[in-house]
Amino acid sequence: MRRFLFLSLLILGACSDKPTEEERRAAVAEVEKAQEAPAQAFGPQAILYPDIEKNSLYGAGCSFVPDGGGLGAVALAMAEEGYMKRDGEILRFAADKGSKELPYLAHAQYDGRDYAFVLTLSEVDGEVSGEETINFPASLSVTDSKERVVYQAQGIAQCGA
């Protein structure tokens, strides 16, 4: 009988070591995170004049060219929409009207279906580059739908009409 009582107490003690609901949720989250696919690099392409013509991408705003990227802009930030090109396709982004307003009606943040981008300018360091254009040191950051950075670059944002 004592043996039975002792074994029962041991078994009962073992049952009290059940994980709490918080510990269980943390374990599930850890397993889900381990199963999550890694972020895929974005790899933007230059938006060239044929792309601009074909998609009517005309108007005031800012275009971002990464350092060492030649003359082709990889992002266009305009009053209502932003644009990037990936795998030969022009991607459209809605302007986040609550984000900081940049020169020439552009905005700092643009949100798309699968990606978002943030354009940051150093407005105090702008240099006039044409009749209606100003070049600003800038950075561009692209995130995926899980808010992981998939592209980041320093360069020049040319803003104008």
Image: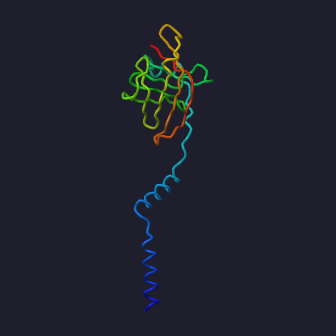
Give the answer, above or below, for where 74 lies relative to 1: above
At a point 44% along the width and 66% down the height, the residue shown is 19
**Where residue 49 sits in the image (x, y, percent)?**
53, 18
Q: Is residue 48 left or right of residue 2?
A: right
At a point 39% along the width and 22% down the height, the residue shown is 79
Give the answer, above or below, for where 158 lies relative to 85: above
Considering every residue shown, the one lying at the far top of the view is 131
**Where residue 114 sits in the image (x, y, percent)?**
45, 38
Colour scheme of the picture: rainbow
**Where residue 136 sits in the image (x, y, percent)?**
52, 18
Write down the quadrant of residue 103 in the picture.
top left
Considering every residue shown, the one lying at the far right of the view is 68
At a point 45% along the width and 57% down the height, the residue shown is 26
| Depth order, front residue of 15/129 | 15
Give the answer, above or below, for where 40 lies relative to 85: below
At a point 50% along the width and 14% down the height, the residue shown is 134
Task: Assign the C terminus to one quadrant of the image.
Answer: top left
Label tally: 0
| Depth order, front residue of 115/149 | 149
Q: Is residue 105 left or right of residue 134?
A: left
Task: Assign the N terminus to one quadrant of the image.
Answer: bottom left
Considering every residue shown, the one lying at the far bottom of the view is 1
**Where residue 2 sits in the image (x, y, percent)?**
44, 90
